[in-house]
Amino acid sequence: MNFVTYHTENRIGYITLNRPEKRNALSHELVIELKACFAKAEQDEHAKIIVLKANGEAFCAGADLGYLQKLQSFSFEENVADSNHLKELLLQIYLLKKVVIAQVQGHALAGGCGLATICDFVFAVPEAKFGYTEVKIGFIPALVSVFLIKKIGEQKAKHLLLSGELVQAQSAVEMGLVSFLVSKNELEKSVEAFALKMIHNNSGQSMELTKRLIADVQSMKLEAALDHAAHQNAKARATEDCKKGIAAFLNKQELRW
């Protein structure tokens, strides 16, 4: 792969954007490689938690503007196909069976901000800025808006999407866009410690089912959501992890997953 790397360490799968000279901008090829890496990570028995990180000064500057300019000569149908290409990646990460943590060491802008938004947790350094700048170049934050509204609500999403303003990492925490603010020197260690805590304390099967449940119930009416939750509850009780966890608790045994 040319633009993304993947390796595992301590049961953590690290997916790294590696196009620093272009501020890790999202090209067609980079998206292809990200899809392949996330598919590999999902099936990797040596990776229980996934970390998305980046090399260079920026986490991700959004879409490659040179590629966007090239797309202007495409037909409507070709542009729909290209949009679906990115949509598939965002949905893949959002519904991935494993928890995904974004490790944001620099600015996350436009589609790059969207990439962080869809991760389950976001760790960022105070120097990082976040924002959806599409309106400043006559474009729209179409796909990422769906996930952003889910995550932080309509009012805060409107502020980011319509103003196109960049916000400091501290403001991103207050908006609910970022989970944890960590100094640059401690970022890598903090992400690893958080991931290892979940790896050792939590059932991977339980995290998978819970993540999917959160995604599913939001689009359902109340009674349908509760019915679905009841079925998932019953399903979870029959899993080996649940049996193992309850037995360990009742027998006062220390359990490390």
Image: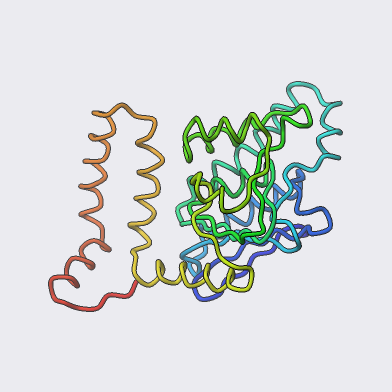
Question: Looking at the picture, how far across and down is residue 223, in whole percent?
Answer: 23, 28
124 vs 168, nearest the viewer: 168
Number of labels in the image equals 0
Residue occupying the point 45% across, 53% down: 97
Q: Is residue 212 left or right of residue 80?
A: left
Residue occupying the point 35% across, 36% down: 217
Question: Looking at the picture, how far across and down is residue 256, in whole percent?
Answer: 32, 75
94 vs 60, nearest the viewer: 60
Q: Quadrant of the C terminus?
A: bottom left
Q: Residue furthest left?
A: 250
Q: Quadrant of the N terminus?
A: bottom right
Q: Quadrant of residue 220?
A: top left
Q: Quadrant of residue 18?
A: bottom right
Q: Is residue 82 left or right of residue 180?
A: right
Coloring scheme used: rainbow
Residue occupying the point 24% across, 78% down: 254
Question: Looking at the picture, how far across and down is residue 24, in whole percent?
Answer: 75, 53
- Relative to residue 185, is residue 76 depicted above or below? above
- Relative to residue 223, is residue 1 depicted above or below? below
- Relative to residue 91, is residue 74 depicted above or below? above
Q: Residue furthest top?
A: 76
Question: Looking at the picture, how far across and down is residue 108, in whole percent?
Answer: 67, 50
Residue occupying the point 37% across, 43% down: 214
